[in-house]
Amino acid sequence: MLVVVLRHGPTPCEGSNMLRLTACHSAVWCAVLACAASARAVDPSPATVAHFTRRVQPLLLNACAAGACHGRPDAPVLQIERAAGRTGVNRQLTLANLHAFLDVVGARRDPSELVALLARRHPASAPAGAFAARPLSSEQRATLETWLDMVRAEEARPQPQGAIQLASGMEDAGQPSRPNRLRALLDAAAQPPTLPPPEQPRGLIFGPIDPPDDSAEEP
């Protein structure tokens, strides 16, 4: 008699291989997400962040996040974080808005497409009577372009290779160090200057007394 065994699901060996493959895929995705998070965690210089805080972020909050357009959690393309209550926009929200705006602009930091979009009502496909954002003024568009130029110039600046992070209060090796006066005194004491040999002092008191001239005396 022929016995047919129907197998439902993988064997223990196959199941083990599937678990290993799933774990491998999970590890790869975690590594990719970690790299993306670390790349995004790099913030611009304090001057660039300050310029964004003073000029760009108020424009995004008033013109883009107003009316719950780009300020709601399910906002399309760009999501601007707004402060809850009266606490104000803190540094964490500011950096989140900064990186969200840079992600929309793209890695090239080219503002041309964004400026062209904001120069007219958008979305352009909005039906008649539907809400559409008003175009930004030329001054507002120039504010965005100026800040993106700062970011692009900063990212294009070559970073020093092999720079050593020193503790707070220590001087950077790349900066000219101030003269150490104590070290200069110690070096001078270890290598005294060569002086000429002393001469025999001459003078009224310490100088040699010349013998009297006997020929000048009268007989």
Image (cartoon, grey):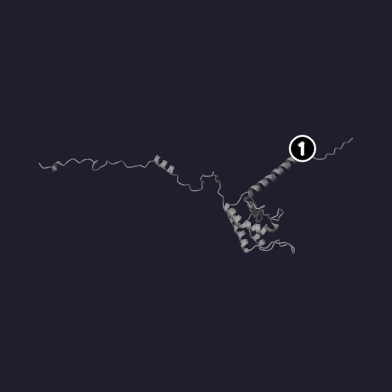
Q: Quadrant of the N terminus?
A: top right
Instruction: Tell me if I can see residue 59 in this picture.
Output: yes
The single residue placed furthest to the front in the displayed view is: 86
| 65 or 201, nearer to the observer | 65
Percent from the top left, x then y, of residue 215? 13, 42
Percent from the top left, x then y, of residue 165? 55, 45
Q: Quadrant of the C terminus?
A: top left
The single residue placed furthest to the top in the displayed view is: 1
Q: Quadrant of residue 196?
A: top left
Q: Residue at x 69, y 45 (%)?
A: 30
Residue beneath label 1, please?
13
Apparent side of residue 30 relative to residue 47 in the rendered image (left or right)? right
Q: Quadrant of residue 181?
A: top left
Which structural element holds mark 1? helix
Instruction: Say if 159 sits above or below 14 in the image.
Output: below
Instruction: Tell me if I can see residue 152 in this picture.
Output: no
| 20 or 91, nearer to the observer | 91
Percent from the top left, x then y, of residue 56? 62, 57
The single residue placed furthest to the bottom in the displayed view is: 128
User: How many numbered discs sit on the rendered protein?
Assistant: 1
Amino acid residing under circle 1: Cys
| 157 or 68, nearer to the observer | 68
Apparent side of residue 23 relative to residue 215 in the rendered image (left or right)? right
Instruction: Say if 208 sits above or below 120 in the image.
Output: above
Q: Residue at x 61, y 62 (%)?
A: 139
Q: Residues within 10 Å of mark 1 (few under 14, many from 20)?
A: few
The single residue placed furthest to the left in the displayed view is: 219
